[in-house]
Image (spheres, helix red, strand yellow):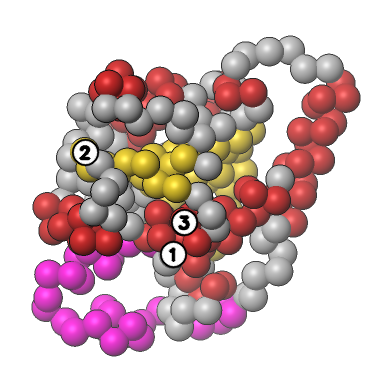
Amino acid sequence: MRVLDLFSGIGGFSLGLERAGMETVAFCEYDKKCRQVLKKHWPDVPQYEDVRTLTKEQLDNDGITDIGLICGGYPCQPFSTAGKRQGEADDRALWKEYFRLVKEIRPTWVIAENVAGHISMGIDNVLADLEGEDYAVQTFVIPACAVGAWHRRDRAWIIAHTDRHGRRERFSQGEVQRQRDREIQFTRGFERWPGRSNLPAPTLCGAHDGVPGKVDRLKQLGNAVVPQIPEMIGRAINDC
């Protein structure tokens, strides 16, 4: 499956999804240092700098077509409990740009990630947007410790799917039931994950990962996702 990685960071989404057998065909990342990391590890994958100006037309003109999955963790600052929680009033709120590309490209799958504080602020709008475009959506709160990390790092994962490349069609009752069966099977793909939810968060930023303090990559790592989580999601998608 061909993947468009938005808000790419240092490539955690793509690393995990490629381990699951998918192919990243384009990145979109605003931070210059992150783009340098992406260029080092994916030298042949095109990069775009600003999700606000990226369009399907531009991707098509560059030969980037047949995108089956869009992924990305849109900025968390508008919803984080560590901030002012201004939601869509925050100028860093970029879900609408993410969603605009979903509507333009109509991928079969969408995977989005954000802080757990998004559950109590703003996530209803995200789900309503996707469902309004005929996507079936499920949300999971998955901590990093569920995939073997030694810190908790709860994150909300939004996974959306539509049949027939997003075309609006009336399904027979049998087709509706088969879709529900696929969604149940997809959810069961997460049941094997270890819990370990009792692990505390690190006292110091980066302490459990052995990352030195006061270095540039702390910001990059802070915005990154644990690759094992998108890998497991990708494998569950492949099993559908």
Q: Are marks 2 and 3 in contact (CB under 8 Å)?
A: no
Choose mark 3 or mark 1, whichever is in front: 3
| Apparent side of residue 211 relative to residue 116 in the rendered image (left or right) | left
Looking at the rendering, the stretch of residues picked out in magenta corresponds to: 196-225
Q: Which one is nearer the viewer's eye here, 96 or 36?
A: 36
Numbered badge on residue 115: none
Judged from this view, the residue extending furthest toward the right is: 174
Instruction: Say which residue appears at 84% left-offset and 31% top-offset.
Output: 177
Image position, residue 226 (x, y; %): 42, 66
Q: Tag 2, which secondary structure? A: strand
Q: Is residue 216 left or right of residue 27?
A: left
Q: Position of residue 100 (x, y in %)?
A: 37, 24
Give percent across and percent down for residue 11.
Answer: 33, 57
Q: Is residue 127 visible?
A: no
Which residue in the structure is indicated by mark 1?
A: 227
How many numbered markers are drawn?
Answer: 3
- The residue tagged 3 is 18
Residue 80 magenta-drawn? Answer: no
Give the amino acid at mark 2. Tyr
Whichever of callouts 2 and 1 sits on the residue coming sooner in the sequence is 2
Mark 2: give few (<14), some (14-19) or many (20+) Cα within 10 Å.
some
Residue 137: image quadrant is: top right
Answer above or below: position of 218 versus 75.
below
User: Which residue corresponds to the image point at 28% horizontal and 80% vertical from the top-left?
Assistant: 206
Which one is earlier in the sequence, the residue at label 3 or at label 1?
A: 3
Numbered badge on residue 48: 2
Q: What is the three-letter code of the residue carrying label 3?
A: Glu
Label 1 residue SS: loop
Describe the element under mark 3 as helix, strand or loop.
Answer: helix
Is 156 drawn above or below residue 27 in the view shown? below
